[in-house]
Every structure is written in structure tokens, then in C-alpha cells.
């Protein structure tokens, strides 16, 4: 039989066969030629097409299980697509192979040129990626890469709390406490190495211990969360100075100029305590409202719903998440409130839960513009946040 050059393939006919009995490959080949002979006329006679090289070698694979045989037929073709489709349809007329009933079904006709084109595209992508990676970066890319590497080498884990920190904590008389790892990296980038992160709004014991031995400056974000962290530090550590990023900005994103300006303008803790004391005496000084004023803005519908849902949660350690129409968006364990706030991002009107309102929860809620936090009790004073805080005693 004639052979077709692999480079001249245009199409490949993929066919599945199912045979009610046990047969061999020669039986299948014989059935293909025998049962299609004379079916399509002399111009599409399979034997002649194969002799002329327009049909390639017919590949047959078989597998026998439980007295039945299944397999595939693959026929390469250099005919045009219409002729190839006719050949494929002709195969489906085969009803017996050897002494057994058989069913032949064309699975697909593959256009080899499309397959080659797809290969070319994927290979071109790979080559372009390799080329791009091998091209020398410009000077700024080199600088950025080196700077980043140096920053990553300098950052370390400090103390039993394994806090992200710069390399000069032990050698410096003064240290700067920031909120997170990203803040440490930004300050390292600009040459400040006596920094340590609190890794959240709860003050770690490592920071408390350091504050007793070194001059401690708190460098916090320019938002309400920063204020809450400062109050927590004042309550638990021997804090010496406080400074903040510009309003609305975070320490991790500010520039070198803004960092040095903030550190130059740090404020002694005595002054901060005086300001906090004045704020507590006059809770409306910064347009804050008292708990009494908040009750006036609470509608009867909201009050009734909050009370009912809070009492429904008693003993469950669960939390309801509500939208602006007081519909329940979901119920989660109270421990999952922070990640739930983060995942939803916005659209939360109120959170009602069986637990205690903490500074960290208030901080997260403020970022998400939540209006109400309702719980059994609270460790946060109502005028310390713009969020309306309600507890069990407000419904009695």
C-alpha cells in the first residue's frame, strides 16, 4: 500500500469502534476496505486513494474486555475537507467486522493545520517569554531589584512573638513601632532600621517589654485605626512619642519625605494624653456623638430587630451580618467576623454577635463603613469611634 508523507497531511479522521465479539486488527482493516468498496465511486475508492498517497496508513488500535472489543481507527488524509468528511461518513456504514456486529462512529476530523498553528502560537509565546527574561533590565529595574533584595535580607523576626523588624532593634536606644510587615519594609527601603511591627491592633508582649528598656515611638496610619492603636499602646506600654502618616494615608505607602517629616513632628506622650483627656471630657469636640445621641437616631424597627437577633444569638457564639434593609446576609461564627468583613468589603449595615466589641473589631468595621456593632458588651467607649455601638444593656 502507498504511504502518505506526514508533512502533506491536511486532516486526520478519528473514529471509535465497538464490536460485539473478539476480532483482530486485520479483520478491521479488511472490513474498512471491503465494506466501503464501490460505495463512493472510483475517485474515492480507499485502495486507490492509498495507492496514490492521498490517504495515509490506516492505524487501528484494539482492546478486548469481557468478550467485547473496542478501539480506534485513525486515517490521515490529504484530500480536501469535503472529500475527507465523505470518507469519514463512509466508515460509519460498516456494520460487521469478521463474524461480529460492529458500530463505527467518527469522533472528530482534526485539521492538522490548526493544530500546527496552535503549536506555533504556544511555542512563540514561550520563546518570547524566554527572550524577555533574558533581555537586560534597565537601570531602574536593577535598582529596584537590588533594593528589594536588600530590604528582604534586612527584615528579621524579633522576640518570642516573632515580630517583623529591622536589624537595629537591639543596638538602638530608640525604636519605632509600626502596624504591620509592609510598614517595616517601607521604612527599611528609606534607611530606617530600628523599626518593629505589632502585626495587628493587639499589642504583643514583645513590644511591652521593649518599651520598658528603650524610647518607644508609635508610627501609625493616618486614620481612626491609628488612633485606636495609640490608645492601646498608652494603656499597655511605656510609650514615649507618637507620630502619624498624613491623613488618609498608610505608613506602608508614604514617601521618604513624608516619613522624615512625620518623625520630625513626633509628639510627646504627655501631650497626647492631655488631648485624649480633653476629648473624653468633650466627646463632641471632633464631631463625635455620645451613646445618648446615638439612641435618638435608632429607629424602632432597627431597635426591635437588633434586640430580637441579639437575644437569638445568646449562647451560640455566632454573628448575624445585616444589609441596609436589615436583611440577614449570613450567619457566621463570631471568630470569623474580621475575615467576613474583609471578604464582603462593603454593603454591611450592621453586625450583631454574641461576644464583646473590641478595638480591633471597631478598626475593621470603620474601614468597611459599617454603621452598627451590636453585642453583649463592649471594651470600646462609644465616643472613641464613629460607629454606633450597642450592647445588651441598651435594650433593657
Image: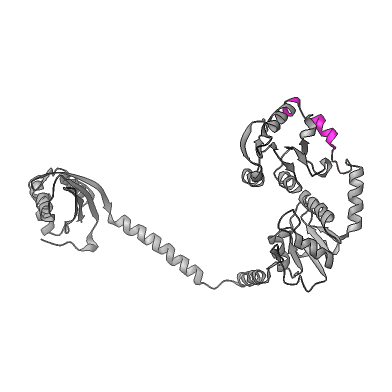
Q: In the picture shown, does residue 375 fall above or below 396? A: below
Q: Position of residue 18 (x, y in %)?
A: 19, 46
Image-based side of 23 in relation to 148, left or right: left
The quadrant of the image that shows the C terminus is: top right
Q: Position of residue 15 (x, y in %)?
A: 22, 49
Residue 292 part of the magenta segment: yes
Q: Residue at x 89, y 43 (%)?
A: 285
Residue 101 part of the magenta segment: no
Q: Nearer the viewer, residue 333 or 185?
A: 333
Q: In the picture shown, does residue 366 fall above or below 79? A: above
Q: Nearer the viewer, residue 284 or 165?
A: 165
Q: Nearer the viewer, residue 135 or 283?
A: 283
| Residue at the extreme top of the image, as rendered | 300
Q: Position of residue 83 (x, y in %)?
A: 19, 49
Image-based side of 228 in relation to 280, left or right: left
The quadrant of the image that shows the N terminus is: bottom left
What colouring style does the render use?
A: one colour
Q: In the picture shown, does residue 213 fall above or below 253? A: below
Q: Residue at x 72, y 55 (%)?
A: 200
Q: Nearer the viewer, residue 372 or 352?
A: 352
Q: Position of residue 138 (x, y in %)?
A: 59, 71
Image-based side of 359 in relation to 66, left or right: right
Q: Is residue 86 visible?
A: yes
* Residue range highlighted in magenta: 286-302
Q: Is residue 347 visible?
A: no
Q: Residue at x 23, y 54 (%)?
A: 12
Image-based side of 46 in relation to 167, left or right: left
Amino acid at each position: 500500500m502507498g504511504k502518505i508523507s506526514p508533512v502533506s497531511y491536511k486532516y486526520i479522521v478519528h473514529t471509535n469502534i465497538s464490536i460485539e465479539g473478539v476480532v483482530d486488527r486485520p479483520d478491521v482493516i479488511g472490513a474498512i476496505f471491503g465494506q466501503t468498496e464501490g460505495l463512493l465511486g472510483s475517485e474515492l475508492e480507499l485502495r486507490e486513494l492509498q495507492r496514490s498517497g492521498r490517504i495515509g496508513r490506516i492505524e487501528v488500535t484494539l482492546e478486548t474486555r469481557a468478550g467485547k472489543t473496542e478501539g480506534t481507527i485513525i486515517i490521515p488524509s490529504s484530500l480536501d475537507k469535503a472529500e475527507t468528511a465523505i470518507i469519514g461518513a463512509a466508515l460509519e456504514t460498516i456494520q460487521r467486522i469478521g463474524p461480529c456486529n460492529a458500530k463505527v462512529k467518527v469522533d472528530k476530523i482534526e485539521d492538522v493545520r490548526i493544530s500546527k498553528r496552535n503549536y506555533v502560537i504556544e511555542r512563540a509565546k514561550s520563546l518570547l517569554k524566554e527572550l524577555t527574561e533574558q533581555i537586560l533590565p534597565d537601570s531602574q529595574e536593577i535598582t529596584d531589584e537590588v533594593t528589594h533584595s536588600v530590604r528582604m535580607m534586612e527584615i528579621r523576626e524579633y522576640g518570642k512573638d516573632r515580630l517583623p523588624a529591622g536589624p537595629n532593634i537591639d543596638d538602638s536606644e530608640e525604636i519605632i513601632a509600626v502596624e504591620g510587615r509592609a510598614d517595616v519594609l517601607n521604612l527599611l527601603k528609606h534607611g530606617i532600621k530600628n523599626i518593629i511591627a505589632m502585626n495587628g491592633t493587639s499589642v504583643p508582649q514583645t513590644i511591652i517589654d521593649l518599651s520598658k528598656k528603650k524610647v518607644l515611638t508609635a508610627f501609625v496610619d493616618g486614620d481612626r485605626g491609628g488612633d485606636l492603636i495609640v490608645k492601646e499602646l498608652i494603656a499597655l506600654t511605656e510609650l514615649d512619642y507618637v507620630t502619624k502618616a498624613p491623613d488618609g494615608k498608610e505608613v506602608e505607602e508614604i514617601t521618604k519625605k513624608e516619613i522624615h517629616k512625620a518623625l520630625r513632628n513626633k509628639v510627646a506622650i504627655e501631650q497626647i494624653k492631655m488631648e485624649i483627656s480633653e476629648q473624653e471630657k468633650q466627646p463632641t469636640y471632633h464631631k463625635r456623638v455620645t451613646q445618648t445621641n446615638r439612641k435618638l437616631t435608632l429607629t424602632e424597627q432597627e431597635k426591635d430587630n437588633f434586640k430580637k437577633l441579639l437575644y437569638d444569638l445568646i449562647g451560640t457564639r455566632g454573628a448575624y451580618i445585616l444589609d441596609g434593609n436589615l436583611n440577614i446576609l449570613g450567619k457566621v461564627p463570631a471568630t470569623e467576623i474580621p475575615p467576613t468583613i474583609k471578604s464582603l468589603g462593603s454593603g454591611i449595615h450592621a453586625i450583631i454577635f454574641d461576644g464583646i466589641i473590641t478595638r480591633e473589631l471597631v478598626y475593621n468595621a470603620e474601614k468597611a463603613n459599617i454603621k452598627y456593632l451590636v453585642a453583649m458588651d463592649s471594651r470600646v467607649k462609644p465616643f472613641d469611634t464613629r460607629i454606633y455601638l450597642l450592647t445588651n444593656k441598651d435594650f433593657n
